[in-house]
Amino acid sequence: MAQGNPVKHKKKTKSVLKNIRQTERRAAVNRMNRTRVRTAMRRMRAALGSADAAGAAKLASDTYSELDKAIRKRTLSENTANRYKSRLALALNALKAKK
């Protein structure tokens, strides 16, 4: 016997269908923006991990820019993006101090 409440389905009215289209479009845009941010962070972390201070410093500006764009487009919350930027900056400064 099934547990819980039965799933309620909305009728496929015009407004529901439009809402579904909008949601799919927004999800695609958010996925694209999130992917761009994650790729930039992955590249910078790779440069930091390989102790390439010059390469990481070059990538820092682009990575911070991608994070700021994600804030503007509301893909990431401001606190989350600032936390990422702060941790990357700390790692970069530690790498520079080490050299």
Image: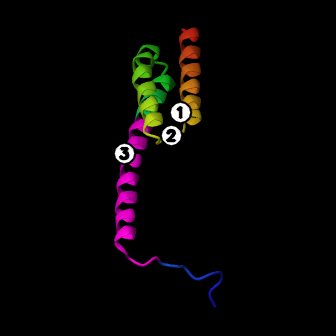
Q: Which residue is disc 1 drawn over?
A: 81
Going by the numbered disc 2, the residue's amino acid type is: Leu
Q: Give me the disc on residue 32.
A: 3
| Image location (x, y in percent) of residue 80 | 57, 36
Looking at the rendered image, the disc whose residue lies closer to the viewer, 2 or 3, is: 2
| Image location (x, y in percent) of residue 58 | 39, 17
Q: Earlier in the sequence, mark 3 or mark 1?
A: 3
Tell me, yes or no, whether the two marked residues, 2 and 1, touch with CB atoms within 8 Å.
yes
Judging from the image, what secondary structure is the residue with disc 1 in?
helix
Q: Is 81 in front, or is 50?
A: 81
Residue numbers of the magenta segment? 10-39
Q: Is 8 in front, or is 40?
A: 8
Going by the numbered disc 3, the residue's amino acid type is: Met
Going by the numbered disc 1, the residue's amino acid type is: Ala
Quadrant where the C terminus sits is: top right
Distance of label 3 from label 1 (alpha carbons): 16 Å
Residue at x-position 65% and y-position 81%? 4
